Amino acid sequence: MQYAVVMEFQHDANRLKRELARTVFAQAALTTDQLDIHHLLARCDLPLYLTTNYDGFMVEALRRKGKSPSWNVSPWYSSGVDDDDERRPPLPEGEPTSQQPLVFHIHGRYTIPHSMVLTEDDYIDFHVKHVRDGMRKGLTPADDRSSIIPSYVRARLRRAPLLFVGYSLRDSTFWTLFKSLMLGLHDGQRSTHVCLQLDPAIRRKASVRDYLERRLGRQQIQIFWMPLEQFTTKLEERLAEER
């Protein structure tokens, strides 16, 4: 995307984002397959869903389950571009609930193209500002309009068990996201469970699997070695057992 901005869009990243939002994301449709991961997660009765995707699939899945979700985006981007600030919805009053959950787009949403973390420069800017926020002391809900992650979302992610679905260890997104969320926390303050779904294709060698389990184990991360489709099926079975 950085190459495209420089070579095809004359350094105009916002024009590229508007084009992608119009031609790709605005045309995308959520599958009606009941084992689709969005539908399944919508059944989990959670108050908070965090996504790095630009689409609105999680909100749509929650609405199909009869819930009343709200959504918001991270304000990592500069204000005053194409009235994007005006298109950003207000944060819900009070804490979200399982029937009125919050879907937080940490890397932006296609309906606010400028909010999309898309290019290499975007990723660098986002994480620099995220680390800056993590080093600030005494952030309050009053700071939520300018903080990269609102206080409610930040506190919930640090206290509650986390499940990362659809990430790859070859992508720096997982590591930078995880480590920035944990910034400043002692081991005793971390979530008791952090789970990561990984495709088993990366474990062809036993030594690779052993290395990853040792490395991630020190970060209190448990790995589910299975493709997303198989993971979705097993999660469906577990939810059925608990009901």
Image (cartoon, rainbow, N blue to C red):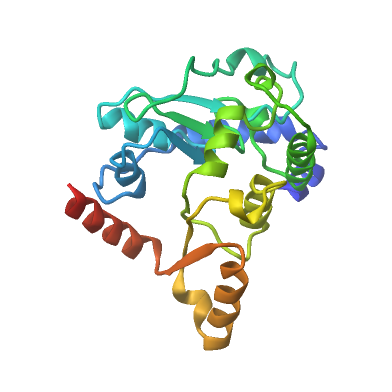
Q: Where 197 sits versus 59, above or below?
A: below
Nearer the observer, 2 or 78 = 78
Give the quarter of the image for residue 213: bottom right
Q: Position of residue 239 (x, y in %)?
A: 24, 51
In the rendered image, is residue 53 in sight? no
Left/right placement of residue 135 relative to residue 182 reads right
Q: Position of residue 94 (x, y in %)?
A: 47, 17
View extreme (front): residue: 188
Q: Where 7 sits versus 232, above or below?
A: above
Nearer the observer, 192 or 183 = 192
Q: Position of residue 38 (x, y in %)?
A: 36, 43
Give the quarter of the image for residue 74: top right
Which residue is at a point 32% across and 26% down the rendered structure image? 99
Give the quarter of the image for residue 57: top left
Q: Where 126 sits versus 97, above or below?
A: below
Q: How many marks?
A: 0
Which residue is at a point 51% across and 39% down the rendered structure image? 50
Which residue is at a point 32% across and 57% down the rendered structure image? 232
Q: Where 120 sits versus 63, above or below?
A: below
Left/right placement of residue 236 relative to residue 195 reads left
Which residue is at a point 30% across and 26% down the rendered structure image? 67
Nearer the observer, 2 or 64 = 64
